[in-house]
Image: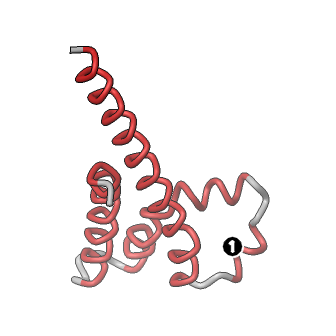
C-alpha cells in the first residue's frame, strides 16, 4: 500500500464525510442538502455534462452516481500518490548510490 496514495485520498474522503454529516444532522434546508450531496461529485458531473452525457445523468440515482464517479476519483488520487511515492523512492535510491 502506498502511504502517499492514501494521503491523497484522505482529504477527499473527509470532504465527503463532512458533506454527508451536514446533511445527516439536518443542519441545512432541502436545497442546501442537495448542494452538499452534489459537492463531492460536482467536478465529475461537470465533466460528464461536458462530454454530453446529460441523458444518462438524468436517470441515474444518487447512490449510483456516487459509485460511478467517486470510485474512479479515488483510484486516480491513489495512483497519482503512488506514482509520486515511487518517483521519490527512486530519487532517494539514486542519491544514496551516488554518495
- In the rendered image, the quadrant that contains the N terminus is bottom left
Secondary structure beneath dot 1 equals helix
Q: In the figure, residue 94 lies in which quadrant?
A: top left
Q: In the figure, residue 58 lies in which quadrant?
A: bottom right
On the image, the x and y values in percent for residue 10 come to 28, 59
On the image, the x and y values in percent for residue 56 come to 75, 74
Q: Would residue 18 be found to the left or right of residue 38 on screen? A: left
From what the image shows, is residue 41 above or below residue 28? above
Q: In the figure, residue 99 lies in which quadrant?
A: top left
Residue at (34, 68) in percent of width and height: 16
Number of residues whose C-alpha sits closer than 10 Å to that of mark 1, classed few (under 14), some (14–19) or many (20 or more): some
On the image, the x and y values in percent for residue 51 come to 76, 55
Q: Would residue 5 be found to the left or right of residue 54 on screen? A: left
Residue at (50, 69) in percent of width and height: 71
Mark 1, residue position: 57
Q: Would residue 4 be found to the left or right of residue 39 on screen? A: left
Foreground pick, 13 / 25? 13
Residue at (26, 68) in percent of width and height: 18
Foreground pick, 93 / 37? 93
On the image, the x and y values in percent for residue 60 come to 65, 81
From what the image shows, is residue 84 above or below residue 13? above
Amino acid at each position: 500500500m502506498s502511504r502517499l496514495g492514501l494521503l491523497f485520498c484522505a482529504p477527499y474522503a473527509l470532504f465527503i464525510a463532512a458533506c454527508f454529516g451536514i446533511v445527516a444532522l439536518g443542519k441545512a434546508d432541502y436545497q442546501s442538502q442537495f448542494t452538499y450531496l452534489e459537492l463531492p461529485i460536482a467536478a465529475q458531473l461537470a465533466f460528464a455534462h461536458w462530454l454530453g452525457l446529460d441523458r444518462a445523468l438524468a436517470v441515474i440515482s444518487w447512490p449510483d452516481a456516487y459509485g460511478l464517479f467517486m470510485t474512479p476519483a479515488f483510484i486516480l488520487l491513489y495512483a497519482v500518490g503512488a506514482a509520486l511515492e515511487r518517483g521519490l523512492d527512486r530519487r532517494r535510491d539514486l542519491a544514496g548510490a551516488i554518495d
